[in-house]
Image: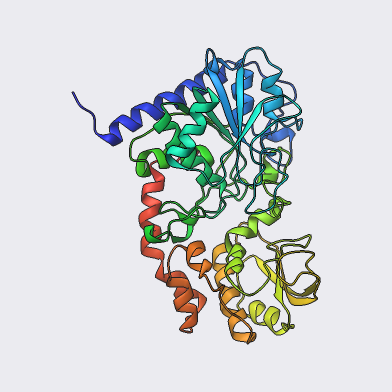
Amino acid sequence: MSLSRRELLTATTATAVSVSAATASTAPATPAEPTASADRRGPRVRTGFERLAADGYALLHGRRVGVVTNPTGVTRELRHIVDVMHADHRVDLVAVFGPEHGFRGTAQAGGSEGRYDDPATGLPVYDTYGKSGQPLADVFTASGVDTVVFDIQDVGARFYTYIWTMYDCMEAARLAGKRFMVLDRPNPVTGRSAQGPVLHKEFASFVGRQPVSQAHGMTVAELARLFNGEFLSTPVALETVLMTGWRRSDLYDASGLPWVPPSPNMPTPDTALVYSGTCLFEGTSLSEGRGTTHPFELLGAEGIDGRWAAAAERLGLPGVHFREAYFVPTFDKFQGRTVGGVQIHVHDRAAYDPVRTGIALLVTARKVWSGFAWRPDNWIDKLTGSTRVRTMIDAGATADEIVAAWQGELSAFRRIREEYLVYG
């Protein structure tokens, strides 16, 4: 009897999830894990790695393991999982794979650390950045691993490249005949809903490989299930080790987990909260706040004054206020020069809509500043996933009109997404 692709995938991933849950559930409770009533910040989340380790790494028994990770792959005591597993005789850890910014996080945006041996462990570190398909599969083959484990903190936006590192690694693991395991971590900006435009395939790039909404509202394990079920030409042998204690409505500070910046310009969970909207300013002549202490919260350019903040404030957007701000970026756009603009102050995180806010700021910036321009390479189209946002803003559309224009495709994506959600 033959199974359809969807039936086969469901059987494979459901087994992996139930095995992970079953093994982790046998781990003894620890006094360091208080209940929600004992912790005013909410439930303490146990990450996928914590559950894997609590079960004595049973799912990795007899396997040669390689880990795709970066500085965010840490325990709540801030020990890196590579260091922890390397020191544990129960894990045969033979390789590490570094994404954009590198395994130890020394590279800026668009950079990586290359191939080297990690001084702390002696493990070979392979560079995945810029590699996909067969070239990346060849890296996995050369490393000698039979299981590729992914553990990186995501920030909930389609154009944050780590989810596409995971996608590329899943495809490469399939080509190389390797198993793929995802150790889950929270979506720091909640998983309540998907928001924003959905990528059109002709605009696929490393900031968006597949038709996913701009704010996806999924964890990396849920995304892996989605990728495997909808986008990979043939599913990879996928296992996901889920969290406990995480609820879809939780922001990061409810998790009880420490925050480690996933990239140099993502210093805090507050940065992640605004990022899925204000990263769109990368596609403009304005600074998105790189080179300041508040990237993506500070936006501006030379020649902008208080009229922009006033125009944005008059919109009455839910959950947010805008302050007239002046700053001097230490690198990137307007390095060493004083620029004017806005600082975003989110006062009601439950009401705040980062994508709608980002669109409204683009619309108002274009109206109040004559120097507004798109990046010559139309990078904005890669970030938003189509020409729609750029052309509608140029035609004088309002933010509400632009948001309304993508609702049909967003509803379709939400229906697909619903099939792959695993948390209540």
Query: How far across and how far down the image is residue 290, in percent?
Result: 71, 62
- Residue 412 falls left or right of residue 99: left
At x 57%, y 44%, the residue is 129
Image coloring type: rainbow
Picture coordinates of residue 188, whole percent (x, y): 62, 47
Expressed as whole percent of the image width and height from the top left, the position of residue 314 reads: 64, 80
Whether residue 240 sits left or right of residue 313 in the image: it is left
Instruction: Report the quarter where the N terminus lies.
Output: top left
Residue furthest left in the image: 1
Is 167 placed above or below 125 here?
below
Task: Choose top left, top right, bottom left or bottom right for residue 301.
Answer: bottom right
For residue 240, say whether it is visible. Answer: no
Q: Answer left or right for 234 relative to 320.
A: left
Vertical arrangement, residue 424 with respect to residue 89, above or below = below
State whether residue 112 appears in this view.
yes
In the image shown, does 100 or 141 lie closer to the viewer? 141
> Residue 185: x and y, percent?
60, 37
Task: Name which residue lies at 28% across and 35% down.
Answer: 5
Say which residue appears at 51% left-offset and 40% top-offset.
166
Q: Residue at x 70, y 85 (%)?
A: 307
Q: How many marks?
A: 0
